[in-house]
Image (cartoon, helix red, strand yellow):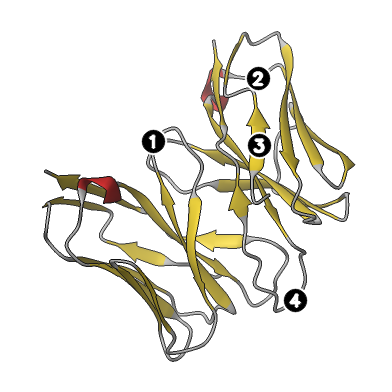
Amino acid sequence: TQLLEQSPQFLSIQEGENLTVYCNSSSVFSSLQWYRQEPGEGPVLLVTVVTGGEVKKLKRLTFQFGDARKDSSLHITAAQPGDTGLYLCAGAGSSNTGKLIFGQGTTLQVKP
Amino acid sequence: DTEVTQTPKHLVMGMTNKKSLKCEQHMGHRAMYWYKQKAKKPPELMFVYSYEKLSINESVPSRFSPECPNSSLLNLHLHALQPEDSALYLCASSQVVQLDYLNEQFFGPGTRLTVL
């Protein structure tokens, strides 16, 4: 069974601080997605990483995929209150049946 | 158009009611999904449709009945639900479901369901 361990589960920081969210597994994933979800809304796809060692940037957000495609991280620089939400990592497993393996999620609160 | 739409936004129903949730996408995607999500938890997969055929049922109780009338539409029929079924129900779509593909899923805004 493929699992994704996401940490931390909760994070409360002040505006302007930096943070990193981790997503780790003992299994290889063919791709990994990061989503952000605001209360009462559906998850919004932020990025997909596919190649081991890949780094992608989306404004103040930097996403990395581990060399072995077993782990990923999301780094936010100078967090803003608008970054508040639930961050989810999700992996497409080795037997791609359409099932995404989700991490437990990180609830981020950025205080002004 | 990169949007998945869901109706209604909110639904309150009694345990004896029958209701339906609707989902629509016009991205030409051939895979569609139903998820159930509780507060501050990740979405839990319920059903997967691939090319309008049910390919995955995650042992969902029969009081939930999915239907895929065509490649753009997905319904979830609800009957005799329990209060513990109250949750956010999310629809998603992806281009295809096949081995080694990206499987990027695009989610709708969800239907907030309350069962009294």
Determine if residue A28 is in view.
yes
Q: Name the residue under label 4.
A: B99
Q: Chain under label 2? A: B
Callout 4–callout 3 Cβ contact below 8 Å:
no
Is residue B74 found left or right of A45 in the rendered image?
Answer: right
Which comes before the other along the chain, label 2 or label 4?
2
Q: What element carries label 3?
A: strand
Q: Name the residue under label 2.
A: B81
Q: Mark 2: which amino acid?
A: Leu
Which comes before the other along the chain, label 2 or label 3?
3
* Total count of labels: 4
Distance in Å between CA atoms under marks 3 and 1? 17 Å
Q: Mark 3 points at which residue?
A: B5
Q: Which of marks 2 and 3 is in front?
A: 3
Distance in Å between CA atoms under marks 1 and 4? 33 Å
Which comes before the other along the chain, label 4 or label 3?
3
Q: Quadrant of the C terminus of chain B?
A: top right
Across and down, in percent, residue A45 comes to 51, 57
Q: Which residue is drawn at 86% across and 47% down?
A: B71
Callout 2–callout 1 Cβ contact below 8 Å:
no
Distance in Å between CA atoms under marks 4 and 3? 27 Å
Q: Which residue is drawn at 40% across and 36% down?
A: B39
Q: Mark 1: which amino acid?
A: Pro
Is residue A104 found left or right of A77 in the rendered image?
Answer: right
Q: Name the residue under label 1.
A: A39
Q: Which of marks 4 and 3 is in front?
A: 3
Do circles 2 and 1 both sit on a common chain? no
